[in-house]
Image: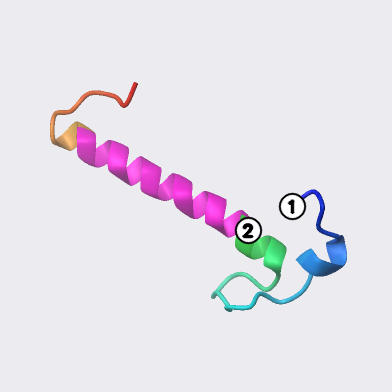
Amino acid sequence: MRGLPDEVLDQPPLTPLRNCTTKYGVLAWCSQHEMRHAGQIGLLRRFLGHGKFY
């Protein structure tokens, strides 16, 4: 991302998402979405009686 100019990040995404109007917004959403799934996996592991990942 560091090498991308702001003009590129301000463009509309190739695949529109409901709450993302720019390519930068899509990239920010992806990281948040990934963390949500990581939390869901951790919760399921606790429910199943497994320990922590580390």
Name of the residue lying farthest toward the front = 3
Tell whether label 2 touches label 1 (CB within 8 Å): yes
Residue 54 spot, x, y in % from top left: 34, 21
At numbered mark 2, what does the secondary structure look like: helix, strand or loop? helix
- Residue 17 lies, with reference to residue 30, above or below; the image says below
Q: Residue 36 vs residue 27: left or right?
A: left
- Residue 21 lies, with reference to residue 41, above or below; the image says below
Q: Residue at x 81, y 58 (%)?
A: 4
Name of the residue lying farthest toward the left = 48
Q: How many marks?
A: 2
User: The disc labelled 1 sits on which kind of residue?
Assistant: Met
Residue 42 spot, x, y in % from top left: 30, 37
Q: Residue 8 vs residue 53: left or right?
A: right
**Which residue is label 2 attached to?**
27
Q: Residue at x 29, y 42 (%)?
A: 41
Instruction: Point out the tag, 1 or 2, that comes first from the N-terminus.
Output: 1
Q: Which mark is residue 23?
A: none
Q: Residue at x 31, y 26 (%)?
A: 53
Is 36 inside the magenta-drawn segment? yes
Q: Residue at x 66, y 63 (%)?
A: 25
**What residue range appears in magenta?**
28-45
Q: CA distance from mark 1 to mark 2?
A: 9 Å
The rendered magenta stretch, by its main secondary structure, is classed as: helix
Residue 43 spot, x, y in % from top left: 27, 38
In the image, 40 versus 14, the foreground residue is 14
User: The disc labelled 2 sits on which kind of residue?
Assistant: Leu
Q: Residue 42 vs residue 16: left or right?
A: left
**Which residue is label 1 attached to?**
1
**In the rendered image, which quarter is residue 50 located in?**
top left
